[in-house]
Image (cartoon, rainbow, N blue to C red):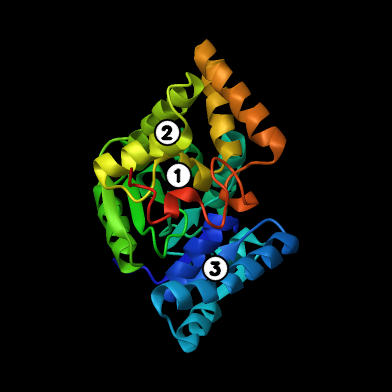
């Protein structure tokens, strides 16, 4: 694996984290986004990560500044990818936007460049043809706050070259991730294939008034030793995201239970401004949710 120059396309929350983590581990990073306004927001986001790395990882001021200085910013895709060994795409989860992006990327990126999608819901085979280099394309999915939650799910599609797959696994390790290879395409990868059914089941227990969120979380935490229960996790994910997923399932399946759950999330949480941890309240109130109380798991 001879990657030195990495381009991150899309500078939102996760794109900014991927760029900074990669630079922190010594790679040269180019960040691409569609305009200067987006890039300025990215610079602000990445600047705030310096403090998090010092707090959470014990990084020195010299280290966090050196990482920032290894990043350059572009709104010209050809310039951003001029010497890229790997492009990590982290643009919106919309099929048409991604297809248009890959068609453009395939025209301007050097022949050597590998393409990886950070998509969490879409499969690489949906875009392989649009890249113009399907054998050099795969998925590389990170979790939010990647410097702490350092998973990297590497998923190939049927046309991915084996050598490319192995190289990207090595790259993930080189930027401090625990590399998790997926040998076949799977919607939701490993993490969400395990997590989403848990979150679904918990929400259905709430909908059916079997128990309240605290009791459901307490059950899971006591029985499994998990640090958080499903409703605490949903507060991190965001209740708007949970609502959108539930509504999409209701429309796709025609299942009346999912429609009732979507209505509950909207009326009791979203409409009341309870969107999760980011707004100070969701299923719990922050910054001191009850599940963090040392006595929460006792009788």
Q: CA distance from mark 3 to mark 2?
A: 36 Å
Vertical order, 251 against 230 (above or below): above
**Disc on res. 233:** 1
Nearest the eye: 227 or 119 = 227
What quarter of the picture does the N terminus occupy? bottom left
Q: Residue furthest bottom?
A: 62
Where residue 227 sits: x, y (%)? 34, 51
Give the residue displayed 60% in from the left and 24% down from the top. Answer: 264
Q: Residue furthest front?
A: 299
Dot placed on the residue nearer the N-terminal end, 3 or 1? 3
- Local secondary structure at mark 1: helix
* Residue for badge 3: 30
Dot placed on the residue nearer the N-terminal end, 3 or 2? 3
Q: Which mark's residue is nearer the viewer, 3 or 1?
A: 1
* Residue for badge 2: 199
Give the residue displayed 54% in from the left and 68% down from the top. Answer: 30
Give the residue displayed 45% in from the left and 84% down from the top. Answer: 63
Where residue 121 sits: x, y (%)? 47, 36
Q: What crowding class fits label 3: few (fewer than 14 Cα within 10 Å), some (14-19), or many (20 or more)?
A: many
Nearest the eye: 98 or 187 = 187
Q: What crowding class fits label 2: few (fewer than 14 Cα within 10 Å), some (14-19), or many (20 or more)?
A: some
Vertical order, 62 against 224 (above or below): below
Going by the image, does 276 lie left or right of 26?
Answer: right
Contact? badges 2 and 1 (CB < 8 Å): yes
Q: CA distance from mark 3 to mark 1?
A: 32 Å
The image quarter containing residue 238 is: top right
Q: What crowding class fits label 1: few (fewer than 14 Cα within 10 Å), some (14-19), or many (20 or more)?
A: some
Q: Which mark's residue is nearer the viewer, 3 or 2?
A: 2
Where residue 191 sits: x, y (%)? 35, 42
Where residue 73 sits: x, y (%)? 62, 69
Vertical order, 198 against 205 (above or below): below
């Amino acid at each position: 694996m001879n990657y030195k120059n990495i381009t991150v396309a899309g500078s939102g929350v996760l794109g900014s984290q991927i760029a900074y983590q990669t630079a922190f581990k010594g790679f040269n990073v180019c960040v691409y986004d569609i305009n200067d306004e987006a890039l300025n927001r990215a610079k602000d986001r990445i600047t705030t990560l310096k403090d998090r790395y010092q707090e959470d990882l014990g990084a020195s001021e010299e280290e966090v500044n050196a990482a920032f200085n290894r990043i350059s910013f572009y709104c010209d895709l050809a310039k951003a990818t001029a010497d890229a060994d790997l492009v990590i795409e982290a643009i919106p989860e919309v099929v048409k936007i991604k297809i248009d992006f890959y068609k453009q990327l395939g025209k301007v990126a050097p022949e050597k460049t590998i393409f990886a999608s950070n998509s969490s819901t879409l499969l690489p085979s949906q875009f392989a043809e649009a890249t113009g280099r399907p054998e050099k394309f795969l998925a590389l999915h990170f979790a939010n706050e990647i410097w702490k939650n350092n998973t990297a799910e590497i998923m190939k599609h049927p046309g991915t070259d084996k050598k490319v797959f192995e190289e990207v696994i090595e790259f993930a390790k080189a930027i401090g991730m625990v590399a998790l290879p997926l040998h076949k395409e799977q919607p939701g990868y490993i993490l969400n294939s395990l997590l989403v059914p848990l979150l679904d089941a918990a929400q259905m227990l709430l909908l059916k008034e079997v128990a309240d969120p605290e009791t459901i979380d307490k059950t899971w935490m006591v029985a499994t030793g998990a640090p958080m229960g499903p409703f605490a996790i949903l507060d991190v994910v965001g209740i708007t995201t949970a609502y959108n997923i539930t509504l999409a399932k209701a429309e796709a399946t025609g299942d009346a239970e999912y429609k009732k759950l979507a209505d509950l999330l909207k009326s009791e949480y979203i409409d009341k401004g309870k969107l999760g941890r980011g707004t100070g309240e969701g299923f719990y109130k922050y910054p001191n949710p009850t599940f963090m109380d040392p006595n929460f798991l006792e009788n």
